[in-house]
Amino acid sequence: MSGYQDVIVAGFGGQGVMLIGTLLAYAAMEDGQNVTYLPVYGPEMRGGTANCTVVVSREDIGSPIIRLPKSLIAMNRPSLDKFQPRVKDGGTVVINSSLVDMDLADNDRLRTVGVPANEIADSLGNTKMANMVAIGAYVQLTSVVPLEVIKASLRKVISPNYAKMIPANEKAIHAGADAVRG
């Protein structure tokens, strides 16, 4: 497993951006790592902009604020436009290619991977699981935590009212990981 990883997860309200961040942070804690999680909401909430920063490390973390992240999960074009220029050279960018034209990816400077998260989620029966597809792809690419820990952590972060959705979310996580396996 990686010793240090940070990511900005960004999209519009309602895409489950904060759930991705919460799930990643919780899974990293379950994996015995140190974590910071910093959510940022636009004033509109659902439909407005939303992003969060997650730092995961085996060592102490000095600050939750990242100026130049190692990675980005961009769920929509405005998020890619805003955060892609900030990603460190050689960093990893997971792009929801269902909503973002991959011609906008900075392939010269970054390791960019398009994942048709909405289409994959649709094929599994629920577009709202696009966020789970994206986190599955990100975890597979970065090895920040074991995929099984992410899946196990769903039960801790998803409300008991939605527990019946956990198996479907687990499938979506696996489908995202499968989409980027080489």
Image (cartoon, rainbow, N blue to C red):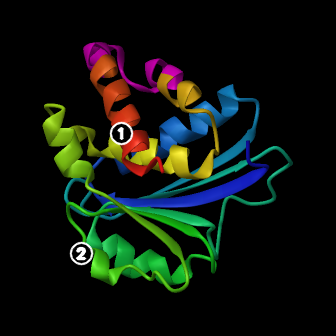
Q: Which residue is mark 1?
A: 132
| Dominant secondary structure, magenta | helix
Dot 1: within a 10 Å radius of its alpha carbon, few (fewer than 14), some, or many (20 or more) residues?
A: many
- Please name the amino acid that badge 2 sits on: Asp
Which image quarter is the N terminus in?
Answer: top right
Q: Which residues are the magenta region?
A: 152-165
> Does 153 sit left or right of 126 as displayed?
right
Q: Which residue is mark 2?
A: 101
Name the residue located 64 percent from the left edge and 58 percent from the top edge: 6
Vertical position of residue 69 compared to residue 20: above or below? below
2 and 1 marks in contact (CB < 8 Å): no
Is residue 56 something that shows in the picture? yes
Q: Position of residue 179 (x, y in %)?
A: 36, 47
Name the residue located 58 percent from the left edge and 26 percent from the top edge: 149
Residue 38 or residue 25, whichever sits in front:
25
Residue 97 or residue 65, whichever sits in front:
97
Is residue 14 something that shows in the picture? no
> SS class of the residue under badge 1?
helix
Q: Position of residue 90 (x, y in %)?
A: 63, 75
Name the residue located 60 percent from the left edge and 70 percent from the top edge: 91
